[in-house]
Amino acid sequence: MNIMAQMDTSCLMIKPELTNEDNIRVVVRIRPLSEKEIRSRFKNIIRIDHPNHISILNLTHNGDECPKTFAFDAVLGEASSQEDVYECFGRPVVEKVLEGYNGTIFAYGQTGSGKTYTMEGVQENKDEWGIVPNAIHHIFLAIDQATDRDKSISFSVRVSYVEVYNDNIHDLLSEDHTASLSIREDPLHGVFVKRLTGFVVASSTDLYNVTTLGNRNRATGSTKMNEKSSRSHAVLMVTIQQNVSEVYISGKLMTRVGSLHLVDLAGSERQSKTGTSGVRLKEASKINQSLSTLGKVIAALVDAKSTHVPYRESKLTLLLKNSLGGNSVTTMVANVAPSDYNYDETLCTLRYADRAKHIKNHVQLNDSPRNIAIERTAGEILTLKKELEQLSKIVDDPTIEFIDTDEKESIEELEEEEERRRRENMTNDELAAYLEMKMQSEAHETDLLLAKKEYDKVQQMLQQVKKHAIVGEENLLEKFDEQQQQLNAWSLELKEAASTERELEMQLHWLESDMVDIEDKYSSLQEEVDEKTKKLNKLMPVLGRAKKELATLERKQRRQILKEVDKVFKVFVTQVRDMTRHLDLYDHILSQWIPEDKLLLIEKNMTWDEWTDEWTISHSSLCGNNVQRQQEPSGSLKQNQRGHSDIYRSYSLESSQIKSANIEEKLKLPLIDKKPSTSNSLEE
């Protein structure tokens, strides 16, 4: 039962407190069936089971396949208005930008899914304004309210508009909007576009005109799926700089720089459905290629084991580098089409969005160097103000008697005389320290006077503002603040009421569904058996398909395992073959140079040493040449070494007897057996 098919699913997006690590928020928006889809009798395959959950059903299997369900920050149904969309995820991002953070909103989806309508809407009708016009209106409304409250605050709004067409960056606000621009990155400026046009706008009307100019220059075309299809990715960049024209005595700083990126991505396409050819086919190829790279970037950012993010494989991903995994409050709106004709594309979009929601951005407040200097100055002024208040208390104290002019002059003369004497008695270091202290004291007094003047100036300004703000007996500022607070309270109550109403409607639908099941009683056990049998017969094909799918997956996994085992086995066989060749070589060397009986004797006396991890031969210190080196004189040894008379290069009976005779003669020992000394020692 499609419970939410006719329901308006407004946004219940959870807005957590902003932290240094902030996940990308993902919202899904479902467009209604188009007239063409209705005429073609396509069916709606999307179901909203919960304001944050969406299910998609594959009707190619007669509806027996289990629906695939996804969870997002919010799901907006077919009846959701443009205002609902902006309040859901547009307003929170713009408010963060006004506070001095970077913000990004980008729309993703197949061609014809409603991305451009979500971002642009219809400018002639305010009720159909998209994210861009609503954000423009919101920005300048907030600026007007801020400047009305505090005349010392000023704002500067700068706008640029680019498109990525066939993987080339074009400036939509330039006279030559078809010229390709280069994109660069450096540690100081980050990612930027060289020679990009920027306009400073003073009102929402100016900004509307600029965006309209850019939209006219944007590349569009007609396909079978969309009569006015965007053939490029468009990025509107709005930079808001908040300045303080005068030093604020209270120390509150309002100077912040926020950057808002509004991105309308071109839709992914299938040539078989769009029927593109020629130039349109080339455009579609480039669009799909850049979106594929965007998918790789998202996958790499989500994968904890990934060490490289391929931002530079596409100019689109490099342009959005700060928005994906960087310093930005980012929201992705995934636009989907509800018809069964677009099942594959809709499922692909939902999987794409499901990966993107795991990306973590590192959000930071953008403080310019000028802000830091102003903040430091404001802190010093606060300190001076406190000292000024203390001095004012001293001046107003009636117990203090002030010195007349003559006495003051006498005291100053005495102080000068005392200072002169003190200088004469000081060393150079002490004098330098004294002069530095005196200069600091004089500078301190000057700062106090300047702070007093600044304080008086601000007090006069506040008095003038209060005079202009009071009409009759009413204070317009206080009245405006009260009305604003009341409006905010009403707005919050309306949102809570709407949320409660939606939850109650959902509960009501669930209760109605349960009531239908309860009222479906059986008149006899036979009817119940028949009904259960029918349900069982319906579920058996589903179970069979699930088993087939499981068996297919098992076969694929088994083939993969067999491939890996075969690969490992081949490596193992190669290693065994190499080891066998080496062993054959060693056996051949041993058989050629060492007699078999001597080899057996050596093997008999060999043991494996676990500590040294090597083979050792028992009594090897008493064998062969070792005994000769220990016994014969040094002169004789050197002579033998020079003549090489005692070195033998193979084991044979003749060489062994000659060696034994030489040893017997030199050591004057009886000859035990005509064998090499090595074998004699080993036998012992």
Image (cartoon, rainbow, N blue to C red):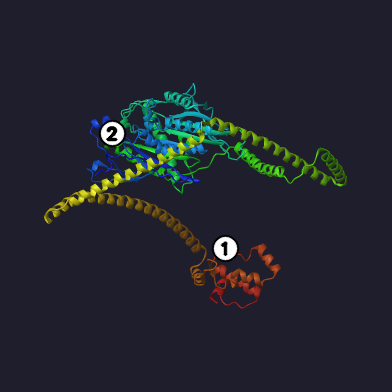
| Residue type pointed to by label 1 | Arg
Q: How would you rate the neighbour count of disc 2 (Cα within 10 Å): few for under 14, some for 14-19, many for 20 or more?
A: some
Q: How would you rate the neighbour count of disc 1 (Cα within 10 Å): few for under 14, some for 14-19, many for 20 or more?
A: few
Where residue 36 appears, x then y in whole percent? 26, 29
The part of the image, by quadrant, that contains residue 129 is top left
- Residue 383 located left or right of residue 473: right
Q: Residue 464 carries which label?
A: none
For mark 1, what is the residue? 649
Residue nearer the viewer, 478 or 264: 478
**Count of labels in the image:** 2
Q: How far apart are marks 2 and 1 (CA)?
A: 95 Å
Q: Nearer the viewer, mark 2 or mark 1?
A: 2
User: Does residue 613 appear in the picture of this structure?
Assistant: yes
The part of the image, by quadrant, that contains residue 416 is top right
Residue nearer the viewer, 193 or 573: 193
For mark 2, what is the residue? 33
In this rendering, the answer to whether 526 lies above or below 635 is above
Where residue 638 appears, x then y in whole percent? 69, 65
| Residue type pointed to by label 2 | Leu
User: Does residue 662 appear in the picture of this structure?
Assistant: no
- Residue 133 located left or right of residue 378: left
Mark 2 falls on what kind of element? loop
In this rendering, the answer to whether 305 lies above or below 37 is below
Residue nearer the viewer, 349 or 275: 349
Q: Quadrant where the C terminus lies?
A: bottom right
Q: Quadrant where the N terminus lies?
A: top left
In this rendering, the answer to whether 231 lies above or below 372 is above
The part of the image, by quadrant, that contains residue 663 is bottom right
Where residue 432 appears, x then y in whole percent? 81, 43
Find out whether the residues at labels 2 and 1 contact each other: C-beta distance under 8 Å.
no
Mark 1 falls on what kind of element? loop
Residue nearer the viewer, 20 or 402: 402
